[in-house]
Image (cartoon, rainbow, N blue to C red):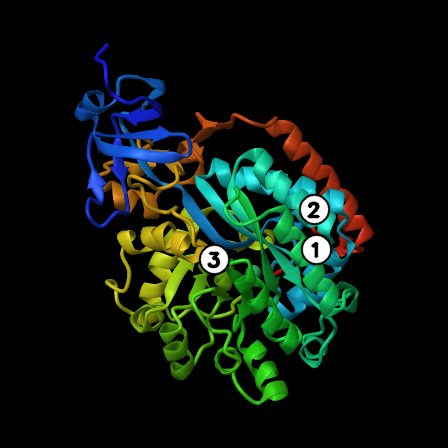
Amino acid sequence: MPEGKPKADLIFSGGDIVTLDPANPYIRNAAIAVLGNEIIWIGKADDVDNHFAVARRKVDFSGQVMIPGLIDSHTHLFQSLGKTLGDGLSLLPWLAKFMMPLSANISPADAVATVRMAALNSLLSGTTTLVDNHYAPVDEATILGVADAMAEVGVRGVVARGIYGPMVEGGRRMQSDARLFQYSAAEELEITRACIKARPKGGLVEVWPMPLNVVYVDPDLMVACHELAAEFDLGWQAHCSESKFEVDIFQSVHGVRPARWLHDQGILDDRITLAHGIWFDAEEIEMLGAAKAHVIHNPVCNQYLASGILPLGPLMEAGVNVALGTDGTACVGLNMFESMKSAQVLQRLRELKPDATSSELVLTMATRNGGRMLRRNVGTLKQGALADMTVVDLGGIHHQPAHRPVCCLTLSTMGSDVRHVVVNGEVVVENGRSTRVDQDKVIADCLQASRQLIERAQIGDLVADWIEP
Ligand SMILES: [Zn+2]
């Protein structure tokens, strides 16, 4: 064995790597070396032995393609409890008749069991980082239990703690469930602060503030959330302008549009992420771009609830960082490959231009742009980045002939094509199975919680074999 060469903990070699690094975006017959939780080298497979004496583990991924681990920049894992219920309702009745009663009845144990299953579901389909906006229940123990569940299955992420505060006029007009508005603004901030301290910046799973919606969170509390995020040098998220009626309600209460209001309060900057961001006017888009704010496109959920189509082209032109998310797992699941395909074709329809998007663009949104929003060194496979990688098998008949693997990744890949997933330098999914938890038990625990919850929330009427169209 040659002497003097460094050791690596983990080397993948033989397949192609889509790096998302503009300097070297696609490497055929590639290899990548990891030490600890960091990528220390990336290059050609036939060169790797010249650089490393030995690796603790070497994986041959010939015939497969590696991408940066996908980043689901905005979702709600606990909503998996109500999966398949509420179909056909638009956002307001969907919230009032389904999601709010469900949310008001979830126990801490339900939430943790469901997040464990949903986070595992994400990992198995190639997602290595999740921003989970958890809004039921939101006590300190549950938020930290959710963070623990994510860490247990091995996913990187953020628990964006859902903040309601006192009921305000916007909440009443949204017909929000009063049971969820249980804490004062001071209590909300205190609980969030305690959670942030328990799961601080830089750990595998962080906690961020998430005042739930610009429409129904107290304005002073919105500003305080911005200050809290700045104090700990974190990002923060809020739902904003998802449906047209939300903008109408906000304007009727405050006299200005929501993003304009954020700008006027001085809290629109590169720390804020607005989930959905569909109904902005031209002035708001300019302000978002100038602030270098982040907006999350949730294309499948937006179609499901008929909310509208995010103006991707204008937002990107203005300089907004647009990342991708699955959002409501009750409606649309947690498959980021589906979100990429949907974003790719939906935006073409919006602009009636087939070149409005490309596979490369939506893959960038699902990786690099998410990393920028997260303020972490993830989303690009390059030396010095955190080792979060997903290996996809494009050998299936549904990909053949795979002339352009990048197009297969966004147009024909299914979550079940994912073979291996590495998070923070650890192989957490191997040959399509978790290396960390008993998958069957994780699923059974969630099923039991879900059945009991539907009974408790008295939404059994939504469980129907067939609803006549
Ligand atoms: Zn959401």
Picture residue at 41% right of the left edge, 30% below the top: 36
Tell me which numbered mark, 1 or 3, is placed earlier along the sequence.
Answer: 1
Picture residue at 67% right of the left edge, 50% below the top: 82
- Ligand 1 neighbours mark 2 (CB distance < 8 Å): no
**Residue 88 visible to the viewer:** no
Label 1 and label 3: CA atoms lie apart by 23 Å
Picture residue at 56% right of the left edge, 41% below the top: 119
Q: Residue lying at the far top in this picture: please name it.
A: 1
**Which quadrant, please, contains the N terminus?**
top left
The residue pinned by badge 3 equals 300
Name the element at disc 1.
loop
- Callout 3 amino acid: Val
Q: Nearer the viewer, residue 276 or 217?
A: 217
Local packing at callout 3 (Cα closer than 10 Å; few below 14, some 14-19, many 20+) is many
Picture residue at 73% right of the left edge, 54% below the top: 137
Q: Where does the image place residue 304, in percent across and percent down from the top left?
A: 52, 61
The residue pinned by badge 1 equals 136
Label 2 and label 1: CA atoms lie apart by 7 Å
Q: Is residue 20 left or right of residue 256?
A: left
Q: Where does the image place residue 246, in percent across and percent down from the top left?
A: 58, 77
Q: Quadrant of residue 146?
A: top right
Label 3 and label 2: CA atoms lie apart by 23 Å
Name the element at disc 2.
helix
- Callout 1 amino acid: Ala
User: In the rendered structure, are the residues bearing label 2 and label 1 in contact, judged by CB atoms less than 8 Å apart?
Assistant: yes
Residue 111 is labelled as 2
Q: Where does the image place residue 440, in percent across and percent down from the top left?
A: 62, 28
Up-down relation of residue 239 to residue 119 (above or below): below
- Ligand 1 neighbours mark 3 (CB distance < 8 Å): no
